[in-house]
Image: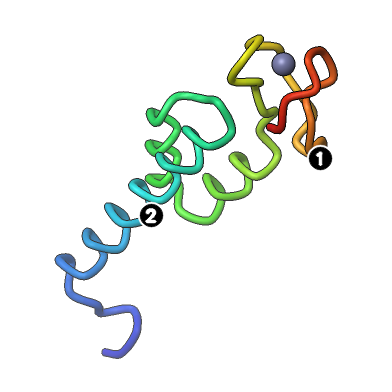
Amino acid sequence: MGAMNQTPVLQLVGVVLLMVGLGFYGAVIGRSPVLGLFGLLSCIGLLILYFFPKRCRYCASSQSYRRKECETCGAPV
Ligand SMILES: [Zn+2]
C-alpha cells in the first residue's frame, strides 16, 4: 500500500498532462506537437526533449538547444 498503489486514473491524468505540456514545448521549439508522445516515457521523455535540437520557425534550420537566436537568420528560437 502507499505510493506504489496509486489509482490508474490519476497516473493516466498525469501522463496526459505531461504529453500536452511536451506537445506545447515541441511547438515552441519549432518542432511537431507530436513530440508530446515523449510524455509516455515520463522523466526520460522530458530529458530527451530538453536536449532535442530546436528548429527555426522562419528558415527551418536546426539550432543547438542552447542557442537563443537562429544562426542563419537571427530570429529568436
Ligand atoms: Zn532562422
Extreme residue toward the bottom, this view: 2
Q: Nearer the viewer, residue 66 or 59?
A: 59
Is residue 43 found left or right of 60 in the rendered image? left
Report the residue at 63% width, 11% height from top: 60
> Could you tell me if the residues under marks 2 and 1 are in contact, i.e. CB atoms within 8 Å?
no
- Give the alpha-carbon distance from disc 2 to disc 1, as whole Å: 22 Å
In primary-sequence order, the first of circles 2 and 1 is 2
Indicate which quadrant contains ligand 1: top right
**Residue 77, horizontal then vertical, whole percent:** 68, 32
Q: Is residue 15 left or right of residue 60?
A: left
Residue 52 screen position, x and y as percent: 66, 33
Amino acid type for the residue under numbered disc 2: Leu
Q: Is residue 2 left or right of residue 28?
A: left
| Circle 1 SS class | loop
Relative to 15, is 72 above or below?
above
Instruction: Choose between 41 and 51: the one closer to the eye.
Output: 51
Please provide percent x and percent y for residue 24.
Answer: 42, 42
Q: Is residue 31 above or below residue 3?
A: above
Q: Quadrant of residue 9?
A: bottom left
Q: Which mark is residue 18?
A: 2
Is the residue at mark 2 in contact range of ligand 1, meaning its CB lies under 8 Å from it? no
Circle 1: residue type: Arg
Residue at x 55% of width, y 26% of height: 30
**Disc on res. 3:** none
The residue mark sitting in front, 2 or 1, is 1
Quarter of the image with the N terminus in it: bottom left
Q: What residue lies at 36% left-to-right and 47% top-to-bottom?
A: 19
Q: To which residue does mark 1 refer?
A: 66
As helix, strand or loop, the secondary structure at mark 2 comes to: helix
Q: Residue at x 59, y 33 (%)?
A: 29
